[in-house]
Image (cartoon, helix red, strand yellow):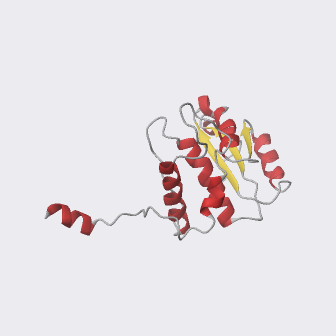
Amino acid sequence: VLACKIVETFKPLHRMAYDELPHFHTIIGGHSKYRRLPGRARTGLFEAQKQVVAALVRRFLSGHDFAILQATMGTGKTSIAASLADVLKKYLAPNKPFPVIVVCPPHLVEKWPREIAGVVPMARAVVVRRPGDLEAYVRGLHNLAPGTLSVAVVSSEMLKLGSGWTAGVAR
């Protein structure tokens, strides 16, 4: 009786189907296509990773403006995030720039661009180390082919350095 009441009260937020996500399989089918993992003959994302991407896409398309992706080490959070960014770019801004900023610990800054390139073919990922790098990243957005995912990777430590702006007071 208790189990029935729980299932009745708490409806799952995620359906394990892709029918309401047009072209989802086409978009995601190219992700991690050329990455070989030890002990696995097939390439591409694992089914569980595709399900997480689909759930997060649904969340954003339903009007939410953030999501938290938390999982244990080795589940492919980086792959899921890169795939999510590409799917959202294709859905929300297929023919215009769709800048994505990744903030990560300093020891992962160099890893992210490699991972993004491995997951999303033809994606552009750059490391931002100083304000001039960010300005160059934004200028470069307009030179990309439509449909190209563009990601700026920033160290969480760099964000602590401050913006270089001075405080202003309006009276």
Q: Most extreme residue toward the top, as rendered?
A: 107
Q: Most extreme residue toward the right, as rendered?
A: 143
Q: In which quadrant of the rendered view does residue 71 lie?
A: top left
Q: In which quadrant of the rendered view does residue 41 lie?
A: top right
Q: Is residue 146 visible?
A: yes
Q: Nearer the viewer, residue 127 or 163?
A: 127
Query: In the rendered view of the protein, which quadrant contains the N terminus?
Result: bottom left
Q: Measured from the top left, where is residue 55 in percent x and y?
A: 49, 59
Q: Measured from the top left, where is residue 62 in percent x and y?
A: 51, 69
Q: Identify the residue at image location x=64%, y=44%.
A: 32
Q: Is residue 169 visible?
A: no
Query: In the rendered view of the protein, which quadrant contains the C terminus?
Result: bottom right
> How many tags in the picture?
0
Q: Identify the residue at image location x=42%, y=62%.
A: 14
Q: Measured from the top left, where is residue 104 in percent x and y?
A: 59, 38
Left or right: 126 in relation to 170: right
Q: Identify the residue at image location x=70%, y=45%.
A: 152
Q: Most extreme residue toward the front, as rendered?
A: 41
